[in-house]
Image (cartoon, rainbow, N blue to C red):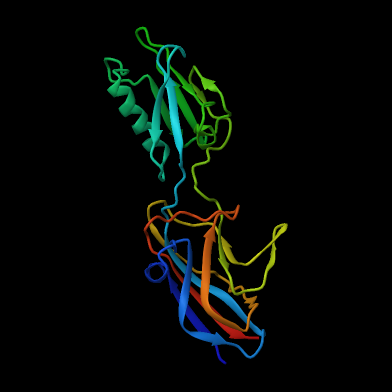
Amino acid sequence: MSTIPFTLGSDRAKQVIPSNTASNFTTPLNQPIDLASLDYELCLLSIKAWYSTKNVVGKTLVYSSDDGSSWTTVDIPDGLYPVQDINALLLASLKENSLVDTDDTPGIEILGNANTNRVDIVINNFSTFDFQVDLSATDNLSSYFGFTEKIVSASESGTLKPNLNPADLWKVHCNIVQEGFDGNTMSKVIASFIPNTTPHSSFIYTPQHLSFHRVDTTRFTSINIRITDENDNDLDFGDEETIVELRMRPL
């Protein structure tokens, strides 16, 4: 048997198996693949996906305008946010509660600082208002902003690099290859890479050097693809389509 190409799309897989997702999908093959032996190997040729994974899930932003006597909670819808979009949600809440000075300066600003690669929380007290941000509350955004868990009552910069990216490393798993070491654990990872694109955009990853992995079965009727972060958690691509191209060849 010569080289066998596979093109696997999550949209088609979901039509057959509705529980499939764009990052974890099983594609039934048109006909079973029967190999004479295990002397075959498989590699990833390319993956086309939409960089839409969420970096904020189940989080809130909690602030006070009366020195901590009472608190207001801003619910952050799950999504992929740059710092300025979080600041826009905060600003909307401040305006709704009349917590903006006469010159339109808000009581709190959360700003990305490109010079220091840190996030600045700016406190602008005015009139009788004394503002605070609670980064120790449940489901807080401290790690996202690069702060330790604390109550911020004066302007300061985060001491840590902000965790704005939903996943630094993406891993592609395939169920029909033999397990190999992935750090200290065994896995069926056939490729790992860092997405070289901006959020909210489509991209195609093509390995510079093809990495082949031996298959672990002589017969299969479907192929499962999982795309995870570095901790092996499935990524969330929403409703966007993922297309994966594989190549199998005899040794």
Quadrant of the frame with the N terminus:
bottom right
Vertical relation: 163 (above or below) 97: below
In the rendered view, does 177 fall on the left or right side of 48? right
Q: What is the total number of numbered labels drawn onto the structure image?
A: 0
Residue 238 found in image quarter: bottom left
In the image, farthest residue toward the top: 128
Residue 158 x, y percent position in the rendering: 54, 29
Q: Residue, x 47% and y 67% (percent of image)?
A: 47
| Left or right: 76 as drawn, with respect to 152 | left
Q: Nearer the viewer, residue 192 or 149?
A: 149
User: Which quarter of the figure is the C terminus placed in?
Assistant: bottom right
Question: From what the image shows, is residue 97 above or below residue 195?
Answer: above
Q: Is residue 61 above or below residue 230?
A: above
Q: Is residue 213 left or right of residue 97?
A: right
Find residue 94 and report its image quarter.
Answer: top left
Q: Give x and y (percent) for residue 210.
A: 58, 74
The foreground one among 16 and 137 is 16
- Residue shown at 48%/79% (left/top)? 6
When the figure is inspected, residue 116 is found, relative to residue 183, above or below; the finding is: above
User: In the rendered image, which quarter is residue 131 located in?
Assistant: top left
